[in-house]
Amino acid sequence: MSANIAGSVQLEVLMPALSAGMEEGKIARWLKEPGDSVVCGEVIAEVETDKAVTDLPAPADGTLHAILIRDGETVSINSAIAVLLVAADAEEAAAAVLGERTLASPLARQLAEKAGVDLREIEGSGPGGRVVRVDVERAHAASAPPVPAIEPEPEHALSRLIPNSTIRRTIARRLSQAKASIPHFYLQVDCEIDALLELRSELNSRPGVEKLSINDFVVKAAADALREVPDVNAAWSDEAIRVFERVDVAVAVSTDGGLVTPIIREADAKSLFDISREARQLAQRARQNRLRPDEYQGGGLTVSNLGMFAVQSFFAIINPPQSCILAAGAVTRRPVVRGATCVPAAVMSCTLSVDHRSVDGVLGARYLASFKRRLEEPRATFIQP
């Protein structure tokens, strides 16, 4: 039953699931204050998900009565984050009804249940009389026996805590699951890219063109190799292996909040310059937390490059539900044998991490051979006829 206030009902605004697999969200900032009128669909807050900051619309016309979750706080989906006052006849259109229960934050409810504290006996100090964490802690402390003093930590144990962002927690959960559940195996090739570096220098010297990075060539070669060996462009499930018809390549981007993988759609059909331009734009939006869900969800393969940090090679963790991730290392001068002669060459080590459930060793090797050939024969690969 709803609480009526002058012909109105109190309706909870819940944290919605704004992306696939989302389990919690953080309030980036409220755009409305208690007492403000809102219209159904009007943006009232910005919510930080595991990949981006997304607008939160009002579920109904009314007045923002109380804000339950403040800027910077994180809650699980379907938790109450605000209360609207709406007309009584608008009750059915709202997301949820407050009802006759104690108004309390999700964290306060968890703490109260764990401590055995009755929320009905606590006077809330939050907005609209809402019971918050500190109220539960005070009530528990008042009824609990004295806690023995804790010895101070030695100087060498001093440290600082960096709160985990939503992105960090999601990355930790997904990669832990991926490493534990996916049977990884690894294939590595050394690509001799002197000809590629020569072509890159030639293309970048043209007046008025945007400069190409080595990673632009890597992404394009990875996409074209997927087109040649399409069964690698796949995802595992217990029922079937899903093979994608479109070649979408995700590119790993490091941000302040963690690793994000925006996607270049139909990368095999795009030129080097198109890929370079789109990759820069997506990386910029990722670092600003402004990616849309369609810009980071999906993809058949991920490219991760740590070459700019002088990392010669590494073994990346697969980004599920994809079957492979390609790790590119630094370009170094190394001796290579050509016929009976040992000569210096520019070499880049690339490692393919593979899900053995959906892609076997021979298939992964065929893909990596196609990728290597494209980097080592750049004019045939990257110059349009």
Image (cartoon, helix red, strand yellow):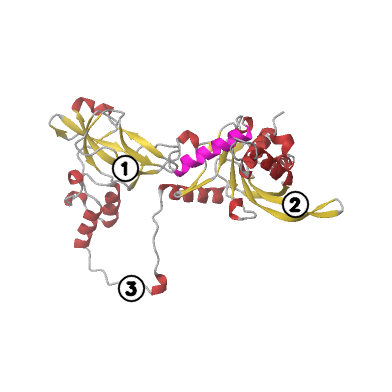
Which amino acid does the dot numbered 1 rest on? Answer: Arg
Pointer 2: what residue?
345
Residue at 56 percent of width and 39 percent of height: 250
Q: CA distance from mark 2 to mark 3?
A: 58 Å
The residue wearing badge 3 is 152
What distance separates the C-alpha of mark 3 from that of mark 1? 37 Å
- Residue 80, relative to residue 151: is it above or below? above
- Where residue 133 appears, x then y in whole percent? 26, 53
Main SS of residues in magenta: helix
Mark nearest the camera among 3 and 1 is 1
Residue found farthest to the left: 6
Q: How many marks?
A: 3
Compared with 314, 238 (above or below) is: above
Per the image, label 3 sits on a secondary structure element best described as: loop
The three-letter code of the residue at mark 2 reads Ala
Q: Nearer the viewer, residue 244 or 122?
A: 244
Q: Is residue 265 above or below residue 140?
A: above
Which region of the structure is painted magenta?
Answer: 271-287
Q: On residue 29, which mark appears?
A: 1
Query: Looking at the image, is mark 2 or mark 1 earlier in the sequence?
Result: 1
Circle nearer the N terminus (2, 3): 3
10 Å neighbourhood of mark 2: few (<14), some, or many (≥20)?
Answer: some
Check the image and name the residue furthest to the right: 340
Measured in 3D between alpha carbons, the distance from the residue under mark 2 to the one under mark 1, in whole angstroms, is 53 Å
* Mark positioned earlier in the residue sequence (3 or 1): 1
Q: In the image, residue 216 lies at what x, y percent?
A: 61, 40
In the image, farthest residue toward the front: 207
Secondary structure under the numbered disc 2 in the rendered image? strand
Badge 3, how many Cα within 10 Å: few under 14, some, many 20+? few
Whether residue 197 sits left or right of residue 169 in the image: it is right
Q: Is residue 280 magenta?
A: yes
